[in-house]
Amino acid sequence: MLAVLAPATLSAAPFAAYVIDARTGQPIYKQNEDTRLHPASLTKMMTLYMAFTAIERGQVRLDSQFPVSTNAASEPPSKLGLRAGQRIELRYLIRAAAIKSANDAATTIGEGLAGSEEAFAQQMTQMARALGMRNSNFRNAHGLTQEGHYSTAHDMTILGRRLFYDFPQYYNIFSRRSADAGIAQVASTNKRFLDAYQGADGIKTGYTRAAGFNLTASAQRGNKRLVATVFGGTSTAHRNQVMAQLLDAGFTRVPTRVREVRPEAPRLLATRVVRRAQVEPSAAAIRADPQRLVLSASAPPVRVSRPAAASTADVAPATRAVASAEPEPTGGLSLAASARPVGRPGKAAAAVAEAAPEAAPSASLAAAVLSQSVRPAPAPRSRSASTAAVAGNGADPDAIARAVAEAVPQDGSASLSLLASPAPKPRSETVILAAMGEGDLAEPEALEIVSRPANSGRGWGVTLGMFKSKVEAERLLLRSALQDGAVLEGAARHVADTKRGFQPSFANLTKANAELVCERFASRSQECAVVGQ
């Protein structure tokens, strides 16, 4: 990022600049880019953007006739010369506003699209927010100085890129040197820069006393395209010269091939009106109709009682109980008379008989199976446990009990047996608070606070000889800042008026950067000296 500081002494208006790679939108150079300043006729870029948007949406056409109001006809120059009551096609108004920067044409566009200039200015501001122009506010369509009407170098550069990408079918109007505006032939206010700078194809100039000389320009060289904005130039020549230097430096910094990132469609906010019908209740709507079928409350289902336990011998009685719970057939089907399905008794009895043929009937269907199942014998907890009992029939409960008894030592000595393990200690209710880490609760060591000046280490500078004119000295500073931007980042620029001449200098540098700057100037045969505090 470059750090060029435009001389405030050259301009009555504050200086600002912003340069981006149009293909990606990434900034290359910026200075006071978010400072709110007077945009002057750069405002017409937004007026034209609104006109192009209305055409593409089908709201108007290029041959639509727009009436000229007294307010529009009385606008100060620059103007096309429209008369009150006159009607003129939109295509001629666009040409006059874009090429000649006619104020009466811009006002006629705004009033024709929105009904009034105030309403159109509000739409312009809303569109600016949708495009990401956060520091712009419009009060008119032409850009003449008015309280509350402002923009920034950043926002106007974003708008210039939008004009190129969003309306390529109309963008060529900004590169035209002259055009037919219906009632007159108009010439471009940007003709000098378009003719002087290679690859320039737009976009818009602007000037007022409060704003200075402004310019938003776009240029292409090979696969590279840049968009830049300059606010606060002292003259047309000075503004064009600074713009050319910024673009030259930008073209050397951007890569030849990059992935193009087109801007997204603007996010416009639309007001949605929802109408709700109000229906008043009527007596016919709430009165019961005797001819209609009205559902009445049905009786709750009857809970069927089930026996707590049933054996194979109880399956038949249970089946009879379920059958007895069914109600007698009536004239209608009632949910209260339904019963839950039961398992098929034949398969349940066969499964029990096959699993335990010798077991006596018990109070549970699964009791016979569980009583005859072979449970795993617990593993002995000691090597002295008898393996004979475990090796025998695992279904013998006595054998399992004897094996466990032999595995438990009688003397209470230490053993692997689970029965001999001691009971856990009761959990303490005391809460111990400790510091994280090693738990050092000692008093912390006192911290030594060392304060340093804000510009510590940057009290060095360089002087670049003497010059006969201030313009030459400032031109050298600007050219040097563009060439050595990385080393001179954050440096302050100054031209001292002495008896021997004008002495340019850079300040607010580190000692290393100051020496490096002088080495580079020495290689270019330029006088340079390092100065310190």
Image (cartoon, grey):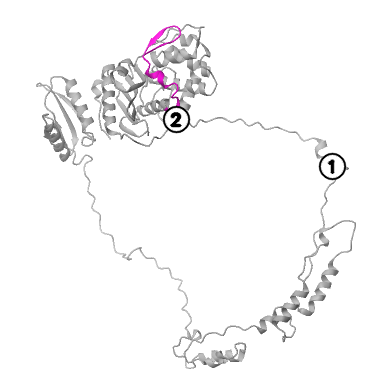
x, y (%) of residue 455? 21, 39
Q: Residue at x 43, y 68 (%)?
A: 431
As drawn, 511 above or below 419: above
Label 1 secondary element: loop
Residue type (three-letter) at the residue carrying disc 1: Ala
Residue 323 seen in the figure: yes
- Residue mark closest to the camera, 2 vs 1: 2
Residue 231 drawn in magenta = no
* Horizontal side of residue 166 vs 341, given as left or right: left
x, y (%) of residue 294? 84, 47
Label 2 secondary element: loop
Quadrant in which residue 509 is drawn: top left
Sooner in the amino-acid sequence: mark 2 or mark 1: 2
Q: Which residue is mark 2?
A: 131
Q: Quadrant of the N terminus?
A: top left
Residue 166 drawn in magenta = yes
Residue 308 seen in the figure: no
- Label of residue 288 in the image: 1
Residue closer to the observer: 199 or 98: 199
